[in-house]
């Protein structure tokens, strides 16, 4: 149990810590912590997907909300103590299928984190907005995605994507996506408990398929609409432990209001 909790915490903090804490490394080396079943996907198929760079290095994923606003996970823009990091250390790469080149790289001007977010433990409200220092030029590889208005049914097929860890235990240079299915709150709470799995979260899983470390902040999409933001999980594609996502439908109002405020700063 203690080990499980440790693993949970360390996987959750990957986005902030930049380097993997020991427990996560243990999981990776033991082959438990990985995306399985993902396939290389061109950015044109997921043009709202962005890469969040922390001091030039792959940190997390993100999603284009508008020409100057990106949605990501709160834990991606916090340090390991839960303090909000200086926005100046972040850049966003848009319009590229590869994490280390292509597309354009834009400086982050400002970040805001949901004020109810807590890092230890991550439960709900794992969501943040990024204001870009210059507006995006939209095109076939750079597009915003609408926010869903209703939560998909249990079992619905959803697509998650990113440059996170793959089965070989390394972050992927090539953008990958994988189709998973919405898991009921009851089933997800069996793994993580009802305190963590509330209306504000949504879970998804499929045998041998999942998001993983480094995918945080990225999109979970159902029928062309954003339904979730990659948040945490125990291991990756670990039987009985679905991936947990911030529930965008429930956080939609917050996103809309804060985005309006941010755009006018
Ligand atoms: N917290 C991870 C990150 O920072 C995402 C983990 C997702 N885990 C999962 N099993 N779906 O990138």
Image (cartoon, helix red, strand yellow):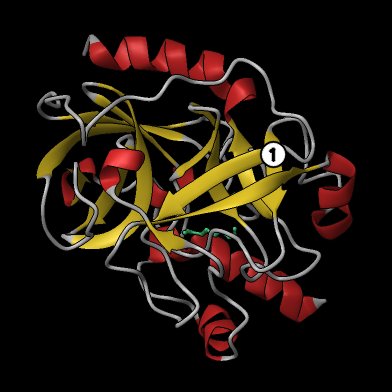
Front residue of 124/58: it is 58
Label 1 residue near ligand 1, CB within 8 Å: no
- Residue 217 vertical position relative to residue 64 in the rendered view, above or below: below
Q: State the quadrant of the C terminus.
A: top left
* SS at badge 1: strand
Hey, which quadrant is residue 50 in on the image? top left
Counting labels gives: 1
- Where does residue 244 sit, x and y in percent of width and height? 65, 49
Q: Nearer the viewer, residue 119 or 241?
A: 241
Instruction: Please give the name of the residue rendered at 59% of the width and 35% of the height, measured from the top-left corner.
Output: 125
**214 relative to 24 in the view: left or right:** left
Q: Where, quadrant-wise, is the N terminus in this rendering?
A: bottom right
**Image position of 211 with respect to 199: above or below:** below
Residue 169, percent across and down? Answer: 45, 81
- Indicate left or right for 103 with 253 as reference: left
**Residue 181 picture location, percent across and down:** 70, 46
Residue 66 picture quarter = top left
Disc 1: CA contacts within 10 A as few (<14), some (14-19) or many (>=20): many
Q: From the viewer's perspective, is residue 238 above or below residue 264?
A: below
Q: Residue at x 44, y 70 (%)?
A: 165
Query: Residue 73 or 167: which is nearer the viewer?
Result: 167
Q: Nearer the viewer, residue 226 or 216?
A: 226
At 22% from the left edge and 23% from the top edge, which residue is drawn?
68
Residue 72 is drawn in which quadrant? top left
Label 1 sits on residue: 202
Residue 211: where, in percent of width, then height? 54, 58
- For image coordinates 40% across by 66% down, the residue present is 17
Task: Indicate the quadrant of ligand 1 in the picture.
Answer: bottom right
């Amino acid at each position: 149990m203690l080990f499980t909790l440790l693993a949970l915490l360390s996987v959750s903090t990957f986005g902030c810590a930049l380097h993997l804490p020991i427990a996560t490394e243990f999981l990776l080396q033991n082959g438990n912590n990985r995306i399985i079943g993902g396939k290389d996907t061109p950015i044109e198929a997921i043009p709202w997907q962005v890469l969040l760079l922390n001091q030039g290095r792959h940190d997390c994923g993100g999603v284009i909300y508008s020409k100057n606003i990106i949605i990501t996970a709160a834990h991606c823009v916090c340090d390991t103590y839960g303090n909000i990091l200086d926005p100046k250390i972040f850049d966003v790469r848009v319009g590229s299928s590869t994490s280390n080149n292509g597309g354009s790289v834009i400086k982050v001007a400002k970040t805001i984190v949901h004020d109810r977010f807590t890092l230890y433990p991550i439960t709900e409200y794992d969501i943040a907005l990024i204001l870009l220092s210059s507006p995006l030029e939209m095109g076939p590889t750079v597009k915003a995605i609408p926010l869903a208005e209703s939560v998909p049914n249990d079992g619905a097929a959803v697509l998650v994507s990113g440059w996170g860890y793959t089965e070989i235990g390394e972050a992927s240079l090539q953008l990958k996506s994988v189709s998973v299915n919405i898991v009921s709150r009851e089933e997800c709470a069996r793994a993580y408990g009802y305190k963590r799995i509330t209306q504000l979260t949504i879970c998804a899983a499929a045998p041998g398929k999942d998001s993983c470390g480094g995918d945080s902040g990225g999109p979970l999409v159902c029928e062309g609409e954003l339904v979730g933001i990659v948040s945490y999980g125990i291991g990756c594609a670990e039987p009985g432990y679905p991936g947990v996502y911030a529930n965008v439908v429930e956080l939609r109002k917050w996103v809309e209001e804060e985005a309006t405020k941010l755009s006018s700063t």
